[in-house]
Structure formats: C-alpha cells, structure tokens
C-alpha cells in the first residue's frame, strides 16, 4: 500500500501505524517504509525501513535501517509473537540525523518496544531518499509458504515534525 508522493521534511517526519490485527509474519515480516520506489520497498531508489521481523530467515524482532537491513540492522528489539494477533501501534520518528520508534502491544505484560539512534554515514534521509517519496506498508511472506498473511490496518498517519 502506498500513498501519493510527498517530500521528506528536513525538520523530520513521524509515521503512526495503528494495526487492529496481524497474522504472524514469516521471512522479513511487516515492513513500514519511506520509499523512493512506489512499487517495491527493496527496488531501485532508497528506502528507510522499520521491520517487525517474523520467523524463518530472521528471529522475531523489530529493527530499523534501510532497504538492505537483512544483514546490518540499526537497532534490534525482541517481541512476543502471540501479541501480534490483537494488534499494535507504531510511532516512528525520522529526523535529519536520528530516528526513534515506540511500539505498543507487541510484548506480553504491556511493555513497549523502543529504540533510538543515529543513521550510519551515508544513510541519512538526505542520502537515501529521492525528492518524492511514498509511504509503504508491506507484510512479507516466504515464497515457499502458500499461506497468505493478513495485516488489518485501522489508521496510518504521516506528519511533518516528530511526535512524542
């Protein structure tokens, strides 16, 4: 799912994703991305990606990075797989030189999954993203698995500036 194009605000942007329910992802999981290529997150053009990884080739964890995060994520935080079923809320802040996220509803007992950091050299939004962007939400399955994966989204919000 991608919206119409927009321009990244140098002062930063925030994405809030409210998921009602989600099947357990496998392979590279649920990916939320600011992407230059409207059609595909890992295609030509840069992307900044927040992945809620599933089982299969990756452990169950959340990580932030660019479109090649498979080997070198910027941050990893584990979550409880069963908690995906009843939904979760992601607040993802992207500044000119740093990022952060808070995810509620992925840990048993109510604790949030959080992380923050700075981009690696050459991987800031100015380095990776084209003049026009798209917000993409993807649930990625394994080509060897014939079961569809479903993600029920209640609301997606994209804002200039960073949210608390």
Image: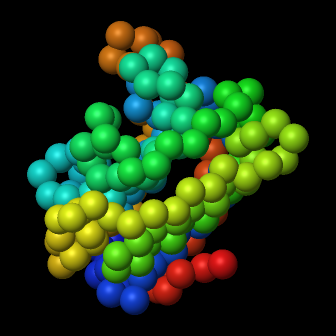
Q: Which residue lies furthest to the right in this view?
A: 109
User: Against 15, is 139 above or below?
Assistant: above
Where residue 110 appears, x then y in whole percent?
A: 84, 47
State the residue at coordinates (49%, 34%): 53
Q: Residue furthest left?
A: 44
Where residue 114 appears, x then y in whole percent?
A: 63, 55
Q: Is residue 46 left or right of residue 69?
A: left
State the residue at coordinates (82%, 36%): 108
User: Against 18, is 73 above or below?
Assistant: above
Q: In this view, does 43 lie to the left or right of 98?
A: left
The quadrant of the picture occupied by the C terminus is bottom right
Of residues 75 and 4, which is closer to you in this image? 75
- Within the image, what quadrant is residue 71 found in? top left
State the residue at coordinates (45%, 17%): 56
- Within the image, what quadrant is residue 57 found in? top left
State the residue at coordinates (42%, 82%): 12
- Residue 13 seen from this side: yes
Where residue 47 appears, x then y in whole percent?
A: 27, 57
Of residues 71 and 68, which is closer to you in this image? 71
- Residue 90 seen from this side: no
User: Against 16, is 105 above or below?
Assistant: above
């Amino acid at each position: 799912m991608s919206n119409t194009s927009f321009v990244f605000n140098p002062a930063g942007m925030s994405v809030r994703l409210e998921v009602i329910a989600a099947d357990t992802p496998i392979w590279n999981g649920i990916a939320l991305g600011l992407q230059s290529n409207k059609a595909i997150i890992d295609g030509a053009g840069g992307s900044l990606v927040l992945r809620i990884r599933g089982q299969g080739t990756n452990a169950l964890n959340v990580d932030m990075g660019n479109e090649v995060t498979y080997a070198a994520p910027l941050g990893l935080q584990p979550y409880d797989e069963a908690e995906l079923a009843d939904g979760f809320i992601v607040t993802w802040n992207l500044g000119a030189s740093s990022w952060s996220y808070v995810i509620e509803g992925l840990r048993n007992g109510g604790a949030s999954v959080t992380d923050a950091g700075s981009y690696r050299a050459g991987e800031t939004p100015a380095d990776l993203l084209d003049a026009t962007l798209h917000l993409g939400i993807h649930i990625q399955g394994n080509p060897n698995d014939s079961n569809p994966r479903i993600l029920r989204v209640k609301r997606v919000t994209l804002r200039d500036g960073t949210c608390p």
